Structure formats: structure tokens, C-alpha cells
Image (spheres, rainbow, N blue to C red):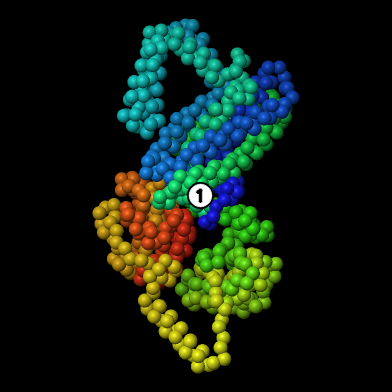
Amino acid sequence: MENVTIGLALIAGILSFISPCVLPLVPAYIGYMSGRLTHNISRQTARGGAAPVSLAFRLQMLLHGIAFVSGFTLIFVLIGLFTTALSSIAGQHVGTFTEILGRFGGLVIIFFGFQFMGLAPQFFAWLRKKGQSGLLDNVLLSVAVALVAAGLFYWGFLEQALVALPLTVVLVAAMFAKGAFTQPAVFWNGVFDQIDSALYSDTRGEIGANGRDGLIGSAFMGMVFSAGWSPCIGPLLGTILTVAATSGASTGDVALGMLLLTAYSIGLGIPFVITALLLNSAQGFLRRLQRQMNKIKLFSGSLLIVIGALVASGQLQSLSQTFSRGEFADFTYRVEECGVGFFEGRLGLSHVGPCLQGRLIPVAINQSASGHFTADAPALEFLFHADPGDIIDVEVRSVNETVPEFLMRLYGPDDIALAQGAKSESVVVEDEFYPLTAFSLAAGGPYRVELSNASGTESARFRVKIRDAEPIATTDDASQSFAGNLLTSLTEIASDLLPSVGLAEGNRAPEFAIATIDDDIISLADLRGKVVLLNFWGTWCGPCRREMPEFQKAYDEWRPRGFEIVAIAYNDSEAAMADFRDEFALDFPLALDNSGEINETYGIQTRPSSYLLDQDGVILARHFGIMTESQLTELLMNALADE
């Protein structure tokens, strides 16, 4: 997916709302918005009955939803900027920033939970009452608060004493200047007055009564939740994140990348705003539950406290990362690929359901796609978009040592089976087979290639490729035909003996030698006899952070059978790469292409990009964008089938 428009980015964001990675964010958002809603309703009813739901009150909830979305959009776009265009400056520090924001923000969420439960106002009222008996006038209270603040600084800034100590000194100096240690009662009463002024709009303690006072708080909540959450990286979002990350990216490239990220975030935010409106429509129902309002407030506040603890401890981020791997990542890919394909017109409405279920796989002409027959999925379809007059070959390669019989049919844009392309009889695939050769397509639109497991075998793996073809040449001269066929056969034999150097599948990969960050020299010639994955990446590359742990799993599993990974970074530093390796416990070779020569030789435009080479250095597959564990496993099962 190379050409990403603002409209497609917006659509991809909307589709991401149903991806598994967003699941941890939804209850957090609902907990915050419902807590604010029940708090306001409780305050209104306490002031004299259930007033009618006004347009202004509805607008207030909408504005808070928009403020929340604006908050996480800001952080998400800034993270995209830091991890791509500004990688050399701040890319390696993004994780530190988000963890610090998550720790302190989690504490703020917990405070909001107590606030919505009504416990915070009661606590401050209790302190004021105790202050009359001398509690606030005790200098030990100021000392205790200073010590607690020092501990929070130390914990919040990731146990970095060099950061926590100066902040503690500044805080203690400010408290001393304000009289916290000489006139503690005056100081603390002044602090409580400032808290009241910041949180409450009147003496009755109604938070944000005019609908504007809490908007900054809602935006901050969005910023905090974005720090404790990371999206699933699908093909389109992966492309967006790498737009500004190519070498020599111009200001225009950076601006385009940020614009696309903003469009994606706005698209993701649209369902959240709609959710705010749906919650707003529940006001009438909540007003009828006035007798249970205290329990509702207790539940919504408790939910926020739990969520705040998850954010502060990093567990929400861990949960989000869990949902970005394995089968969850595959589902995210299908959601984005199928949804965007429908809006682009590459998939019809009838194709969306099978596509989301994994029974229909979109594939572009001249690209490969893997398939897997199982007892639950005895048939698979591959959908591609063609123009009138296109001539195609359909190539099926086996991944198993033995492949069962299957039936194959080609369906046109009108979903009618094309007789010329139908294979009604069973065929056995041993190495590779072209069921359709030089088939001319009469009309443009989506075509489907259907493969059915005719023998009923429960497991069979294969790869399908629909590619451009040339018309079959015919001649009446038998001698010319014989000579031409002989010459073609000799050419093919020579090509098999010594494939030409190039970047297409079937070519020998260009040779190179490079030093790893451990000062070892590694070259392709040294890796002959092994299946090699060349991965082009960067520590600043968001999709790479999702991909590398999957590569390590595959490396652990397949290395004993002759698998090697060489990960080549560019526009990076060895120190950042070493930290990245330690963070994800990587033990395959990492190398830095300082000059960019190898990246240029392999035509790398986006990261991550990967080439899989066989034991002779011949390119088996190319993959541009993030590669999931299941995709890599499919390729390795084919490449190492005989090992």
C-alpha cells in the first residue's frame, strides 16, 4: 500500500477502533466519561431536582469527548514525529517519555476516580476540620508531604535520582518560601483554596458546571491514555509511520507524515466522540436511577481508580502490546486491509465478510499470498483487481512435501465462474503448477481465484501468485518452433544454474559485507547454506518495535534448522541499537549501514522491509512493511521444508 491519501488514513483510523489494541482504551474512556456524567447529574439533582436535559448540557459532553480525542491525537502525532522524522534527536527517548507520562498521569486518573466518587471533597473537608484542632499547623505535616513528593518524583521519573533530587530541592524551596515550614496552617489553607478554585466552579462543588472548566482535564486524560496505549500497526498505518522516516526526508515529507497521522487519529477519535453522544443520551435513564446514584458513582470512580493503577504500573501498555501480536495482529491486518480495500473499490460488499474471516485474501497482481487448508477452512479465495485486457498467469507453489488434490476456479467481476479458467478436475501439485496460463481478462474489476481442498486432507500449505503474462506465441514453422523451444529451455537451464543478480524473486541477492555492532564482519557469502532474512529497520521505527519480538520468536524456533537473521539499520546509532537489543532480548546480528550504500543497493524506501534468501542466496520473497509471525512462519515452512 504505497499511496496513502488523507481520506484513506481517516478511514483506517475509524477501522482501528475495532482492532484488539484499542480494547484497553475503550473501558478507560467510558469509565472517565461516565464518571464525569454521573458526577454532574448527581450535582444537578442535589441542587433541586431533575432539571430537563438542555442542549448546552449535551454539548458539554460532546466537547469533553472532543477534548479527550484531541489529547491522545496530540501525543500520538508527536510520538510519530519523534520516532520517524526526528529519530536522531529524540526517537530513542520516546519510550522514556511515555512511561513517565503514564506514571504521573495514572496518579491523576486515580485522583479523578476519588473525585467522581465524592471522596476527595470529603477528605479535604476533613483536613480543614482537623486543621482547627492543630493538624494543619504542625510542621511535621509539611515535612511528611515533602518526603512523599520526593518519593513520587523518584518513582515517576523511573528511579532517576539525578532528576528527582533537583525537583525535590525546588519543591522544598518553594514550600519554604510560601511558609510551609514557618506558618503551615496558613500555607495549607491557601493550598486547599487553590484546589477548590481549580476544581470547582462554585461553593456547592460542581465540577465543570459551565462545561468549559474541565476541558483541559479531559484533554489531559486523552494524553495520559495515549501514553498507556499503542495502536496495532497495520499495513496502512505502517506506511504512514515510515513516510517521514526515509533517508533525507524533507520538510514536506515530515509535514505529510504528520498530516496523515493526524487524519488517522481523527478517524480513530470519531467512534469515541460518538460514544460520548451515546453516553449523553443515557442521562434520562440515569436520572430515573437517582436512588442508585451513589452506587453508580462508586462504581464509575472505582473503575477509574483501577484504570489509573493499570496506567501508572504500565500494565495497560503491556495489555495493549499483547493485543498487537499473534492472531490479534493478523485480525488487525484483515480489518485494515479489507476495510480500506472496500472503500477503495477493490473489494465488493459481498467480499468484506469472507475477507474479515480470513477466507478471502486480497492480493495484488505480481504479489504472492500464502494459504493454509485446515479442517475448518477447506477452501480459500484470493481476490485481485484487474483492468480490461490484462493477461495473467496463476501460479500455485506447494509448501508441503505432499500436497493434496484441489479444485481451482476463476470468477469474474460478476461472480460468474469463467469456463475457460475453471479446473473442474482434481490436480496434484508437486513443485509448482500454473492452472491458468496467459488467460485474457475481458472486463475490469475484482476477480477471485478459488482453491478447494478436494481430497479432504486436514492440512495443506501453499502460495498463490497472480502475475502478468504474455500471450502464447504460435507459429506454423515447426523447425522455428523447435529451435525457439530449445533456446528457451537452454536459457532456463542456465538461469537455474546461475540466477542473475537482482531484487526480484528468483534473483540472487546483491552481495555485501558489513560490520555488526559487536564488531564482527558478516557477509552473504559466509551465510551460504542457510536461509537468511535480511531486515532493514531502525530503532526509531514504530512498526519495527512490533516486528522484532516476532522475529526473535522465529529465530529461536528455526535457527537449529539453518535460519539466520541479519538486521541492518540506517540513520541510527550503535548505542541506540544496543539499547534496543537489550530491551527486546535480541540475539541475532544487528548491523549499522552508516553510508546507506546497502540500503540503496536493495532499493529500501520504507522500514521495515525484508528479503528472504534461500541457501544459495536466491531471493525467495520480498516484504515491505511489518511482517507478522504467521507470515514469517509460512515463508520458513516453505524454505526449510526439507531440513
Picture residue at 55% right of the left edge, 69% below the top: 466
Question: Seen in the image, is 374 located left or right of residue 566?
Answer: right
Q: Which quadrant of the figure contains the C terminus?
A: bottom left
Q: Position of residue 172 (x, y in %)?
A: 36, 17
Q: Residues within 10 Å of mark 1 (few under 14, many from 20)?
A: many
Residue 160, quarter of the rendered image: top left
Observer able to see residue 8: yes
**347 left or right of 543?**
right
Provide residue 224's location: percent of width, then percent of height: 50, 34
* Residue drawn 52% across the image and 67% down it: 366
Name above or below for residue 376 compared with residue 106: below
Dividing the picture into quadrants, the one containing residue 361 is: bottom right
Q: Does residue 286 appear to the left or right of 192 in the view shown?
A: right
Question: Could you tell me residue 149's position as x and y percent?
Answer: 40, 22
Q: Callout 1, which amino acid?
A: Ile
Residue that appears at 57% across and 34% down = 68
The kind of secondary structure element at disc 1 is: helix
Image coordinates of residue 161 in percent, x first then y, are: 32, 29
Outermost residue on the top side: it is: 133
Which residue is at a point 64% across and 22% down the rendered structure image? 210
Q: Is residue 113 left or right of residue 210?
A: left
Q: Is residue 578 above or below residue 164?
A: below
Asked which quadrant contains residue 491, the reply is bottom left
**Residue, disc 1:** 240
Residue 117 seen from this side: no
